[in-house]
Image (cartoon, grey):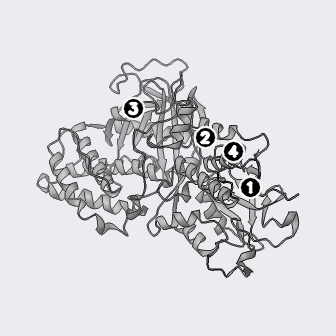
């Protein structure tokens, strides 16, 4: 009796488990299927956890638009959107944020809102959208809207450039349009001039955008590709019972033993000529020395792991993760695409009702900077409660600052947060040593009670060898074509015939190595739903190949 085709899925994250779910439920048991996961848990870059008796997300947090999102559909069908307990980002606390500038100055909304409107308008232009009406009461609104609209006509001139350069040009055009304001100081803001204050607010908003994209600097983010990225319509929400509820739903149909934890693949040999195990063409090597032969492998590891896999060489010079090495079209795409680090820092306060803060820092070359604020805090845009009645605060870090955060001790982090909040708000913040602190009255920074930090928790996606970062982006020098190249299965079969690596094409096994994951989706990269779609895509490719795509 002929053996069943053996399919091994590498990685038990969203993409891998979606593929496994589809293959298992649609194939009438015609495959020998397994999922091998290098870590000790399922979920990949989804990791619901707890901190200070609160449910938090160490990784993926948002459903990016509920209209048409498969993640939203699953969460709704499984009752995961409803909970009796409060959860992270269940309400929009950032909408009530108070903005503080270095030196202890609270910035009025009449100054913040127009610059926020300008930034959002420019990002809408970069994304190829219609400009929304800018809300607020400032007299600058008409100038800003006119500047953004006029700037729209120059959009095509930025193709081949970066989102960062587009934003800078947009801000400069706005400032030129109101040049009659000059460099005068702003009453009540010390040494801050109007331009330096608005520029610092604009930079704060740019730093928030860095965490959305994972780019260390927006000057590395490709401008042309920004308009290809797609969002679902509707509100962006979090999942009341945790993002892992979606993962557990996908895995729930799979029989026990199909998912194998702590099984790290160290090498993928494809186009193997060995006669072992019915001549299955792919040979997988594991960290424990074991070997598995397969007909098809779906690789769902992160772009960061792929980058390391094509760059690494062992002492014998036999190459990295793949043998033979990946063809140029694939390895070049892996090298060109961007992949960054975003980390979350959770801070437990000694009381609830801590206000949401937006943080505005002076330029590096300014003589008025507070030198005691550590550099890794200076591109942090917000410190906000995870919901309106929580004593747990959340800050996001991207790029070099995110990597530095992973190296710091809890004491160093607490000291950095205490210094930063104190220098910007002008109010004292301490490390908590008391067991029974007094409550904060009315949640006001003007109260006499000293705010205290009890403990912190951080994610470490950059240093984790199973991820080596957070999510992908289209870097300057790459394009959406590279994302399509990521999705191409190997070996690449040409319809006109010929040879593949010296073999008659007709005798070469198809779909030996397949690729899924957020970095393989052209329009939904960097998202969990992009990973979901990619898992469905590769499962459907195999079902069609075996003519069981009923």
Label 1, on which residue? 8
Q: Mark 3 against mark 4, which lies toward the viewer?
A: 4
Dot 2 surroundings within 10 Å: few (below 14), some, or many (20 or more)?
Answer: many
Label 2, on which residue? 47
Q: Mark 1 against mark 2, which lies toward the viewer?
A: 1
- Proximity of marks 4 and 2: CB atoms separated by less than 8 Å: no
Q: Give the x, y percent position of residue 524.
A: 48, 53
Q: Which mark is residue 463?
A: none
Q: Which mark is residue 25?
A: 4
Q: Give the x, y percent position of residue 283.
A: 79, 64
Q: Mark 3 against mark 1, which lies toward the viewer?
A: 1
The residue located at (56%, 72%) in the rendering is 332
Q: Secondary structure at mark 4?
A: helix
What is the CA distance from the residue labelled 3 to the residue labelled 2? 23 Å
Q: Nearer the viewer, residue 247 or 450?
A: 247
Q: Mark 4 against mark 1, which lies toward the viewer?
A: 4
Q: Nearer the viewer, residue 174 or 494?
A: 494
N-term-proximal mark, 4 vs 2:
4
What is the CA distance from the residue labelled 3 to the residue labelled 1? 44 Å
The residue located at (15%, 57%) in the rendering is 177
What is the CA distance from the residue labelled 1 to the residue labelled 2? 23 Å
Residue 26 in the figure: left or right of residue 408: right
The residue located at (52%, 68%) in the rendering is 336
The image quarter in which residue 320 lies = bottom right
Q: Secondary structure at mark 1?
A: strand
N-term-proximal mark, 3 vs 4:
4
Label 3, on which residue? 93
Q: Give the x, y percent position of residue 550.
A: 64, 51
What is the CA distance from the residue labelled 3 to the residue labelled 4? 41 Å
- Proximity of marks 3 and 1: CB atoms separated by less than 8 Å: no
The image quarter in which residue 541 lies = bottom right
Dot 1 surroundings within 10 Å: few (below 14), some, or many (20 or more)?
Answer: many
């Amino acid at each position: 009796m002929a053996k069943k085709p053996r399919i091994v899925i590498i990685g038990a994250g969203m993409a891998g488990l979606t593929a496994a779910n589809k293959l298992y439920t649609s194939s009438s048991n015609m495959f020998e299927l397994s999922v091998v996961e290098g870590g000790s848990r399922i979920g990949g870059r989804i990791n619901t956890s707890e901190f200070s008796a609160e449910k938090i997300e160490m990784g993926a947090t948002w459903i990016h638009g509920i209209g048409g999102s498969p993640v939203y559909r699953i969460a709704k069908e499984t009752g995961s959107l409803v909970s009796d307990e409060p959860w992270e980002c269940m309400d929009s606390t950032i909408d009530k944020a108070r903005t503080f500038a270095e030196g202890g100055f609270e910035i009025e909304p009449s100054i913040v809102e127009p610059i926020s409107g300008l930034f959002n308008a420019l990002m809408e232009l970069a994304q190829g959208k219609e400009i929304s009406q800018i809300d607020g009461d400032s007299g600058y609104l008409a100038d800003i809207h006119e500047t953004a609209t006029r700037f729209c006509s120059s959009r095509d001139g930025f193709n081949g450039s970066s989102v960062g350069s587009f934003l800078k040009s947009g801000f400069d055009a706005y400032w030129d349009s109101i040049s009659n304001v000059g460099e005068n100081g702003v009453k009540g803001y010390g040494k801050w001039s109007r331009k330096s204050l608005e520029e610092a607010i604009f930079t704060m908003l740019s730093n928030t955008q860095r965490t959305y994209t994972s780019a260390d600097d927006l000057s590395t983010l490709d401008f042309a590709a920004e308009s290809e990225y797609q969002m679902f319509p509707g509100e962006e929400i979090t999942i009341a019972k945790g993002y892992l509820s979606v993962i557990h739903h996908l895995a729930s149909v799979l029989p026990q033993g199909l998912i194998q934890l702590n099984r790290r693949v160290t090498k993928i040999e494809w186009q193997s000529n060995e006669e072992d195990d019915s001549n299955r063409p792919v040979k997988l090597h594991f960290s424990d020395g074991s070997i598995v032969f397969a007909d098809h492998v779906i690789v769902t590891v992160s772009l960061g792991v792929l980058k390391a896999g094509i760059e690494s060489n062992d002492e014998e010079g036999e190459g990295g993760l793949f043998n033979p090495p990946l063809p140029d079209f694939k390895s070049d795409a892996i090298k060109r695409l961007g992949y960054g680090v975003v980390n979350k820092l959770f801070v437990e306060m000694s009381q609830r009702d801590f206000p949401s803060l937006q943080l505005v820092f002076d330029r590096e070359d300014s003589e008025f900077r507070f030198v005691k604020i550590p550099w890794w805090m200076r591109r942090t845009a917000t410190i906000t409660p995870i919901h309106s009645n929580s004593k747990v605060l959340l800050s996001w870090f991207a790029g070099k600052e995110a990597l530095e955060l992973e190296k710091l001790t809890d004491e160093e982090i607490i000291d950095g947060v205490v210094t930063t909040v104190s220098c910007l708000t002008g109010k004292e913040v301490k490390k908590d040593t008391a067991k029974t602190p007094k409550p904060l009255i009315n949640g006001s920074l003007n109260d006499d009670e000293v705010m205290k930090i009890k403990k912190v928790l951080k994610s470490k996606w950059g240093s984790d060898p199973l991820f080596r970062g957070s999510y992908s982006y289209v870097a300057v020098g790459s394009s959406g074509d590279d994302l399509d190249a990521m999705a191409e299965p190997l070996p690449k079969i040409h319809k006109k015939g010929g040879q593949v690596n010296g073999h008659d094409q007709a005798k070469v096994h198809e779909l030996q190595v397949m690729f899924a994951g957020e970095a393989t989706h052209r329009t939904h990269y960097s998202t969990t739903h992009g990973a979901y779609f990619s898992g469905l895509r590769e499962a459907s490719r195999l079902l069609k190949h075996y003519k069981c795509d009923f």
